[in-house]
Amino acid sequence: MLRCTTAGVEKVHAFLPSSSFPCSLSRMAEPVRKQVADVLTAGSEYLAKRGVENPGLVCKLLLSRLLGCKHLELPVRFAEVLGEEHLAAMRRGIKRVGDGEPVQYVIGEAGFMGHTLRTDKRALIPRPETETLVRQVLDWGPLWRIEKPRIVDIGTGSGCIVISLALERPGAVYAAFDASPEALALARENAAALGVAENIAFCDEDLSEVIEPQTTNAVVSNPPYVATADYEKLPANIRLHEPREALDGGPTGLSVIESIIQDSAIIITPGGAVFLEIGETQSQEVTSLLEREGFEDIAVARDLAGRPRVLRGVMPA
């Protein structure tokens, strides 16, 4: 009886894992030339059957990374025939995503505020909701009327927030904190790749040991805000791959937020502000925490889905 080797099957099938094809048919078939359009269609169907969200976009992200182009450019390359190396790489990538790994970790990058950031398991994947946070900081006029505002990013992770701010407002002074040395290393790599490494001080020390009281014009943070019980219910592709410490905010989801607000009340100058990304049901509770620490002029901003996502509190002048 003939045995089917993995190498033999990969020379025959165009995209899906070898288990999708009878061994005998694979042996007899001639190698199939596959175009970009064929691969995207087959890959999307494969991922859809495994419950992956937005399978078409995921396939485009994988293939555009392999081809070194933007995913929006793929339509003009639909008739292009892929070589065996690209097909094999696509099979591996699709298999990983189909098994639950986030596509951003598979391709090693994520888009954020129009920039491309290196992304891996050292830090949370940058998300569109956090762009709302960055825009709120950029749009707050009083901050940018200061000649060299001092801005602190707490829990910087990949560095997406502070790097985006530094790219848009290079005249400010930035410090980024994270308890994870691995996350800080990733943030430094991203800052260097985007040319702002000299603009940002990355710190793993305790905030109170580095920042003097009333010396900071703005604090910005995307803290862990998922309640522990809710964390256990998160989709497997998040729970099993992204760092728990960047998501789990304790029993109520407010443990880290409360600590950040308390620290901010000490280091922020009169007239300065704190900007926080929050869970969509937390605005009232976080507002109470801000008011308790003396913040005023509290404002809520909604994300693109219309959910309360960012809170700003101002320290009275």
Image (tube, rainbow, N blue to C red):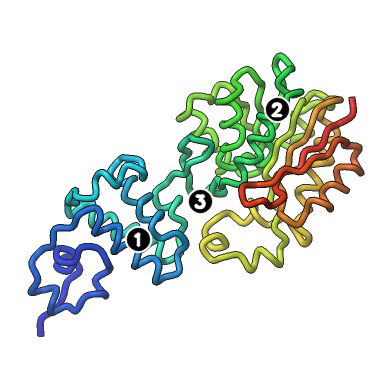
The residue labelled by disc 1 is 94
Residue at point 84% right, 41% down? Answer: 262
In space, the residues marked 3 and 1 are separated at their CA atoms by: 18 Å
Towards the viewer: 283 or 254: 283
Q: Where is residue 314 in the image (x, y as percent from the top left)?
A: 83, 33
Indicate the quadrant containing the C terminus: top left, top right, bottom left or bottom right: top right
Residue at point 55% right, 43% down? Answer: 182
Q: Which amino acid does label 1 sit on?
A: Ile
In the displayed structure, 200 sits above or below 290; it is above
Q: Earlier in the sequence, mark 2 or mark 1?
A: 1
> Is 9 situated left or right of 184 in this image?
left
Q: Position of residue 286 (x, y in %)?
A: 82, 49
Please name which of the two marks, 3 or 1, marks the residue nearer to the observer.
Answer: 1
Task: Point out the residue furthest to the top here.
Answer: 147
> Residue 92 sits in which quadrant?
bottom left
Q: Which mark is residue 121?
A: 3
In the displayed structure, 314 sits above or below 179; it is above
Q: Where is residue 227 in the image (x, y as percent from the top left)?
A: 72, 61
**Mark 3 element type:** loop
Indicate the quadrant containing the N terminus: top left, top right, bottom left or bottom right: bottom left
In space, the residues marked 2 and 1 are separated at their CA atoms by: 40 Å
Report if the CB atoms under discs 3 and 1 are less than 8 Å apart.
no
Q: Which of marks 2 and 3 is nearer the N terminus?
A: 3
The residue labelled by disc 2 is 151
> Residue 206 sits in which quadrant?
top right
